[in-house]
Amino acid sequence: MPKIQDKTNIICHHCGDECKDEHIFINDKHFCCAGCKTVYEILYGNDLCAYYSIEDKSGIKKADTVLEKKFDYLDDKDIQNKILEFSDKTLSSVTFNIPNIHCASCIWLLEKLYKLNKGIVTSKVDFLQKTVSVVFEHAKISLKEVVILLSSIGYEPQINPDNNETGKKFIKNANKKLLLKIGITGFCLGNIMLLSFPEYLGLDSLMDGNLKTLFNYLNILFSLPVFFYCSSDYFISARNGIKNKLINIDLPISLGLAALFVRSMYEILFFNNAGFIDSLAGLVFLLLLGKLFQNKTYDALNFERDYKSYFPVSVTIKKHGIHQCIPVSNLNVGDRIIIRNNEIIPADAILFSGTGSIDYSFVTGESIPEQKVLGEIIYAGGRHIGSAIELEVVRKVSQSYLTKLWNDKAFNKTESNVQQLTNTVSKYFTAVLLLVAVSSAFYWLGKDNINYALNAFTTVLIIACPCALALTTPFALGNAMRILGRNKFYLKNAFVIESLAGIDTIVFDKTGTITNSKDINVKFTGSSLNLCEEGMVKSLVRNSSHPLSRMIFDSIQIKDVFAAEDFKESLSEGISCCIDGKKIKLGSIRFVLEGLENSFCELKKEISGAAFTTNVFLSIDDCVKGFYSFSNKYREGLSELISDLSEDYKLSLISGDNSSEKNNLYNFFKNDEELLFKQTPSDKLNYIKTLQKNKQKVLMIGDGLNDAGALKQSDAGISVAEDVTNFSPSCDVIIDAGVFTKLNDFIKYSKTTMNIIKISFAISFIYNIIGLYLAAQGTFSPLVAAVLMPFNSISIILFVTGMTNFCAKRRKLL
Amino acid sequence: MTSIVVLIAASLIVAIGFLAAFIWSVRSGQYEDKYTPSVRMLFDDDKKPEKDDLKKI
């Protein structure tokens, strides 16, 4: 039976999208666009078609043919040096960030690059980080050609010479070191425990004296790497703390570790006793494990992005009639720049020719494109949709309306991961500890009992080693961070929980944050349309891929569509066609009203009321019917969230838009809450600063680049993202838009976590007080002390992880 | 008793061998990307014509 292929069922062989009316058919395969076909041809020509069999719908839709000129800046030696990781006489290596990597097929294809070009030696994909590392012979293929090759198969790298992710590399190296240390400590701990077995079982008295000595000396040998290498971080941190006149948690830890080590050496070397080397190794092992547990990072997410990682690296300028590519940093006032479809405007500029349709979704969160006409200023950061436009730069890149935000000193302050709670506690702890240790030593010295004095002094230090204290925070925060991450609430690091728990004021951005940028309300104003007319509109917009057309298409529920004849699309103007002999026009006011000024008068009132918003006008048979307007819907569950939050927090809203939505917002916010409109990015930043001057702890929730300053300045900044791997401004937390309404749960859970930490501090104090009481008397057997300590630590770890899980379950987060 | 000393020496040598293997694996970056290798191993190897030619000869 022949397969009946319905038009709507034709799927593009490359990208898996539905093929629209126009499609290409070669080799028995359908392609939705020329871009997809080109990629297929490249792969087919190189015998790489297995790409399509690994995973369904693997291909990436390629919007345009690759503009080779776009990458001209890669021939520049300075930029090359910034991008290349390594280069010698024959080989160069480079790592590209490719956001398009999404499936197994991508890995397969990107690791077969050597088949596409002989100059490429190897390429290796890191799927979670979405990077590919390429080693190539630069005599055979230049860096620019590598990038063009990648782009030609749909994997255009994101290149950013100024942001070579040194931060991530640093973390990676630190993690590597930590793993090594854990491995070595684990090895030593295992062996030490094995050698201490006779002692544990009380068999040491039965042992040959020589064997006991051998065991003890082997133990010393194993303790050396643990003490001098694996625990070195604690000593370094404690020393740095003292230098900066700060007592941190690492100081009492270092004291305890040193006391353990010195006392053990003393016991073994002078008395051939067992010492406490096993407790030393066990402690270091647990501490390092805690560190590893706390250091969870989300590979695919980036919390450090500024505008540079979003802005283009180069831009085409027109000079004396010649087009040339220059790095955006060299852009000067007065330069003419050419911006093509889907490119980002790098600096504030005046529209010189063409019509701009600018999508500011990454800046403001507004997903509806703005129409711009000649002579209007276009602010940097917008993405242009439509045919190429020419602009004249009026401000340098770093001085633009948006980018000058990054000149604020909020962006220069180095963030310190201060664990305030732990540090405050450990300050007093250390003082008391030293006081008890020294006074008990003096007490016994006063009685002329040097041995007892020494014994008491070291035992106090050993028993009071605040391991439980030091283990509580990493295990509690690390576990909470994982639980929150499972709920799509991704923290930059575990310390953010403490900041989240401390806030008392919440500031919202409007567009894209409390509104849903994916869900658009399309409203028609004017004379009401009958079913037939609506069907005609739907048939018209079906042919256009403009975002506004798609929105209108989705908003009309009618199923029947008519055949549209004589379809015309004038870019950035509007679309028109004939249906049943009736002419339908849809588009900008100028486009639709050409020669129809009279019928326009009836609607003048409505139109002038909506002068500054994006509207699409409709005329059928030269009669203006009205216009479509677009507005964002508020997220579902917003009013519950706001009323829940307003019980405990001071709320306010800062928006860059005008106050037209003010009345709608009062449905959610109470009257006494501050709602600010028409705020520039710097206003938002300054607003946070003023709040902080009043000793308020501010949580900022935003989504676009215009919130970047406020997010950075606030005590905790949450960025809302529809797709978490896409761009989001630098912040402390990235929250998936789908779970936005659970925000209150997340903040409350952070508070609970901090409370759990406080409780476990109290527990470990009780342990310590009992231990100290016994130790200070000097009668406490060192063996019991050494057993009590690991018991103390492990019980605390079990307590905090168990409690954080339990509380998460109660909040339905687990 | 000497047998214990010999056993300990032997066990230490084995354990140090594993430690060395662990250090090597960390240094060579095997813990950096814990996901991609699991996908990569499922791909079929390319047919290498040179090997086939060798068999024929």
Image (tube, coloured by chain):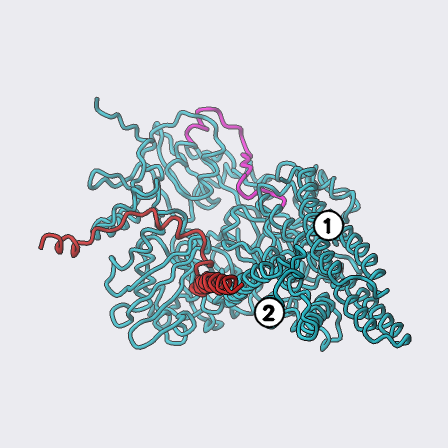
Chain colours: A cyan, B red
Amino acid type, residue under disc 1 in the picture: Ser
Quarter of the picture containing the C terminus of chain A is: top right
The chain under label 1 reads A
Residue contact at pointers 2 and 1, CB within 8 angstroms: no
Q: Is residue A725 magenta?
A: no
Quarter of the picture containing the N terminus of chain A is: top left
In the picture of the structure, the residue carrying the numbered disc 1 is A652
Residue drawn at 73 percent across, 58 percent down: A469
Examine the rendered structure and indicate whether residue A66 appears above or below residue A321: above
Q: Is residue A522 magenta?
A: yes
Task: Give how far across and how far down residue A533 sits, in percent.
Answer: 45, 27
> Is A12 left or right of A314, judged from the image as shown?
left
Amino acid type, residue under disc 2 in the picture: Asn
Q: Which residues are magenta?
A: A514-537
Q: Between disc 2 and disc 1, whose residue precedes?
A: 2
In the picture of the structure, the residue carrying the numbered disc 2 is A210
Task: Give how far across and how far down residue A250 sits, in percent.
Answer: 70, 67
Cα separation, mark 2 vs mark 1, equals 75 Å
Is residue B13 visible in this depiction of the protein?
Answer: yes
The extreme left residue here reads B57
